[in-house]
Image (spheres, coloured by chain):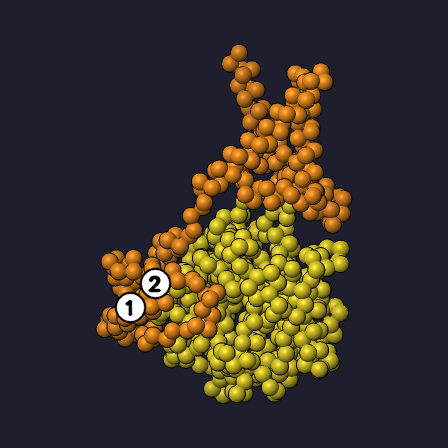
C-alpha cells in the first residue's frame, strides 16, 4: 500500500510538472503537443507506465487515496494534437501479449490427441479388413461425426478456446465450423437460416481450397 | 438557456432529477462474479424459457423496466418516456420489449454507452420540464452479440487476451422530478472520437481516447479535478482500456486514482473473460445493481459515471474501417 501511495504521489508531482510546463507555454493553445512530446521522450516514461498500470480496482473501490490534483490540460483528440500515430504507440504498450508458449503446448497436445484418436480408429478399421482408401475415408467420416457430436454437446468450443489451431486444423474442426452455424441459425429457419448460413465459416476454406487444388492440377497438367 | 449549459459539452441540472428506483436482470455467469447477489433477478440459463436469445434479451429489458416501475410503487401510466437501447440491429431488443410496455419509447443507440446516454437524455427531459418521470434502460446478451458481431457461439475459436466478454444483463433506472434517491447533477455528452484502432478484439483501446476526452471536457467545463468525485467509473473499457485511459489522463495532467471500470468489476479473473466485461448490459447492471446502492448507503458521495461505446458495425469493420467511439458522462450524488 505504501509503495502504491508513493508511486501515486510521485505521479501527481510529475503531472503537476507537466501541467506547469503547459501553462508556461501560453494560454489557450496550451502547448499540449509539446507536453506530449516531452512526456513521450521523457526518461520518466517507465515510471509513468508503472503508475498508469495500476488496475487493481477490485479491492480498492472505496479505498481512495487523494493526492493534490494538478490542473488538467486537454488532450482533445478531436483536434488531433494526439495523433493516431502517437496513440498507436501508447495503445500498443498496453496490448496484452498472447500467451504464445501455453497456446502452442495446448495446440500440440490437443491436435496430437485428435490425430492419435484418428489413428486408433484407422487401426481398428484395418483390423476389420477396411484399409487403404476405404479405411481412410471411413476414418474421416468417424472423425467428422465426433467433431459434430462434440459441437452439438457444447464441448468443442471449450476445447477450441484453449487449443486454438490444434482443434481447428484437424477434420474435426471442419465439422465444428459446419455444425456450429447450422445449430446457430436454425432459429432463422431451414432456408434463410441453416441453408444460407451453413457455409459462413467453412465457405472461404472451400472456395480457396478448391481454387488452389484446381490451379495446382492445371499446373501439373501443363508441366507434364 | 437559463444557464443550464456549462462550458463546451456539459449541462448542469437546475433541479437535479432523482433516481427513485432501479432494477437489474442478469444471466447466471454475471451472478457468479464479484457482484454476486446484488442483482434483482438472475436468469437460470441464457434462454430463460424463450425460444431464441433475441427473445430472451427483449424479455430481460421488459422485466427490468417493469421491475423498476414496480419498485417505485408506480404503474406504467405514471411514466412519460421510456429511453432504451441495446446492441442489436434496429435496436430490436428494446423495440420488441416496448411492444408490451405502454410508454412512449425513445430508442437510443450509443453502443455500450447506452446506459449513460439514456440517463443523460432522460435527465434532460425531466429538468427541461418535458417529463415528470422517465425510465432509462439498456441491455445486452452475450449470445445475441456474439452471433451478430462475431462467430456462431459453438465455434471453437480462440479469443485474444485483449478481448472482452459481452455481459448478459439488463438494467433500468427510474428517474423522477421529485423524490428521495440519488441525484443526477450534471451530464457531459461526448464527441465521437476515432484514433485509428481497428482491432474489434481490442475495443478498450478504441474507446479509451473518447473516454479521456469526455472526462477532460467534463472536468474542464466544471473547473474541477478528478478528486471532486469519490469514484470515477467507466462503462466497459476492460483492463486494457482502463490502463490506457489512466495513461492518457496522466499525459493530460490528471492523476486518476479513484477510478474503476464496470467491465473490470463485473467478472472475476478466474472467469476467463480475458480483459473483462463489455456490452450495454455491463454498465447497466453494475451501475444499477452496485454503484447506486453504494451511493444510497452513503459509502460513496459523488460518482462520475462515463459510459463508453465502441460504435462499430461488423460490416464497416470488415471493410477495414477503424472503430469510432464515444463516451457519455453523468455525475451522480448521494441523497442528502
Name the foreground residue: B103 vs B255: B255
Label 2 crowd (10 A; few <14 / some 14-19 / many >=20): many
Name the foreground residue: B318 vs B116: B116
Question: Relative to B189, does residue A91 appear above or below in the rendering?
Answer: above
Q: Quadrant of residue A73?
A: bottom left
Residue at point 68%, 18% (across, down): A126
Name the foreground residue: B65 vs B41: B41
Mark on residue B106?
A: none
* Labels 2 and 1 touching (C-beta < 8 A): yes
Q: Quadrant of residue A199?
A: top right
Residue at point 56%, 80% (across, down): B296
Which residue is label 2 attached to? A51
Marks 2 and 1, how far apart at CA:
9 Å
Q: Which chain is yellow?
A: B
Quarter of the figure with the N terminus of chain A: bottom left
Q: Secondary structure at mark 2?
A: helix
* Residue A57 visible in this rendered orientation of the protein: yes
Q: Chain of mark 1?
A: A
* Residue B108 x/y as whole percent: 60, 68
Name the foreground residue: B145 vs A169: A169
Q: Chain of mark 2?
A: A
Residue at point 53%, 47% (across, down): B159
* Residue B331 x/y as whole percent: 49, 77
Residue at point 43%, 75% (across, down): B218
Question: Relative to B4, does residue B216 appear above or below in the rendering?
Answer: above
Q: Quadrant of residue B267?
A: bottom right
* Residue A216 x/y as whole percent: 54, 22
Q: Which chain is orange?
A: A
Which residue is label 1 attached to? A10
Label 1 crowd (10 A; few <14 / some 14-19 / many >=20): some
* Residue B96 x/y as whole percent: 72, 64
Amino acid at each position: 500500500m505504501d509503495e502504491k501511495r508513493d508511486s501515486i504521489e510521485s505521479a501527481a508531482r510529475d503531472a503537476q510538472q507537466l501541467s506547469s510546463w503547459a501553462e508556461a507555454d501560453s494560454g489557450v493553445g496550451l502547448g499540449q503537443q509539446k507536453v506530449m512530446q516531452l512526456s513521450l521522450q521523457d526518461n520518466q516514461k517507465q515510471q509513468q507506465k508503472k503508475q498508469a498500470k495500476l488496475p487493481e480496482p477490485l479491492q480498492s473501490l472505496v479505498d481512495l487515496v487523494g493526492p493534490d490534483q494538478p490542473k488538467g490540460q486537454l488532450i482533445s483528440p478531436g483536434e488531433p494534437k494526439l495523433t493516431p500515430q502517437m496513440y498507436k504507440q501508447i495503445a500498443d504498450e498496453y496490448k496484452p501479449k498472447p500467451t504464445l508458449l501455453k497456446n502452442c503446448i495446448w495446440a500440440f497436445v490437443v491436435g496430437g490427441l485428435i490425430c492419435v484418436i484418428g489413428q486408433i480408429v484407422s487401426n481398428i478399421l484395418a483390423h476389420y479388413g477396411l484399409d487403404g482408401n476405404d479405411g481412410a475415408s471411413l476414418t474421416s467420416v468417424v472423425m467428422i461425426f465426433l467433431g459434430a457430436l462434440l459441437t452439438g454437446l457444447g464441448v468443442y468450443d471449450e476445447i477450441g478456446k484453449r487449443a486454438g489451431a490444434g482443434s481447428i486444423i484437424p477434420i474435426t474442426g471442419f465439422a465444428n465450423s459446419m455444425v456450429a452455424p447450422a445449430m446457430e441459425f436454425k432459429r432463422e429457419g431451414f432456408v434463410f437460416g441453416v441453408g444460407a448460413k451453413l457455409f459462413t465459416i467453412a465457405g472461404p476454406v472451400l472456395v480457396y481450397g478448391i481454387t488452389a487444388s484446381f490451379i495446382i492440377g492445371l499446373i501439373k497438367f501443363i508441366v507434364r | 438557456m437559463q444557464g443550464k449549459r456549462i462550458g463546451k459539452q456539459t449541462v448542469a441540472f437546475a433541479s437535479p432529477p432523482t433516481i427513485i428506483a432501479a432494477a437489474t436482470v442478469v444471466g447466471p455467469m454475471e451472478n457468479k462474479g464479484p457482484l454476486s447477489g446484488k442483482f434483482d433477478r438472475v436468469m437460470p440459463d441464457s434462454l430463460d424459457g424463450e425460444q431464441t436469445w433475441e427473445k430472451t434479451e427483449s424479455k430481460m429489458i421488459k422485466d427490468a423496466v417493469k421491475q423498476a416501475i414496480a419498485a417505485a410503487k408506480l404503474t406504467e401510466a405514471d411514466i412519460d418516456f421510456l429511453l432504451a437501447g441495446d446492441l442489436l440491429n434496429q435496436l430490436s431488443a428494446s423495440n420488441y420489449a416496448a411492444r408490451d410496455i405502454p410508454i412512449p419509447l425513445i430508442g437510443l443507440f450509443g453502443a455500450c454507452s447506452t446506459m449513460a446516454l439514456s440517463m443523460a437524455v432522460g435527465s434532460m427531459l425531466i429538468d427541461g420540464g418535458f417529463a415528470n418521470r422517465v425510465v432509462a434502460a439498456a441491455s445486452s446478451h452475450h449470445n445475441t452479440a456474439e452471433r451478430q458481431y462475431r462467430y456462431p457461439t459453438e465455434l471453437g475459436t480462440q479469443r485474444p487476451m485483449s478481448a472482452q466478454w459481452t455481459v448478459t444483463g439488463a438494467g433500468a433506472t427510474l428517474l423522477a422530478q421529485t423524490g428521495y434517491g440519488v441525484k443526477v447533477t450534471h451530464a457531459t455528452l461526448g464527441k465521437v472520437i476515432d484514433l485509428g484502432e481497428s482491432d474489434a478484439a481490442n475495443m478498450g483501446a478504441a474507446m479509451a481516447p473518447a473516454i479521456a476526452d469526455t472526462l477532460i471536457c467534463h472536468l474542464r467545463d466544471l473547473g474541477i479535478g478528478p478528486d471532486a468525485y469519490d469514484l470515477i467509473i467507466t462503462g466497459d473499457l476492460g483492463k486494457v482500456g482502463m490502463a490506457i485511459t489512466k495513461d492518457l489522463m496522466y499525459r493530460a495532467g490528471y492523476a486518476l486514482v479513484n477510478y474503476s471500470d464496470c467491465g473490470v468489476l463485473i467478472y472475476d479473473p478466474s472467469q476467463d473473460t480475458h480483459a473483462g466485461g463489455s456490452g450495454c448490459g455491463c454498465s447497466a447492471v453494475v451501475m444499477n445493481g452496485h454503484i447506486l446502492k453504494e451511493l444510497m448507503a452513503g459509502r460513496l458521495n459523488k460518482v462520475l459515471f462515463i459510459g463508453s461505446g465502441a460504435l462499430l458495425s461488423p460490416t464497416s469493420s470488415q471493410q477495414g474501417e477503424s472503430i469510432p467511439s464515444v463516451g457519455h458522462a453523468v455525475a451522480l450524488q448521494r441523497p442528502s
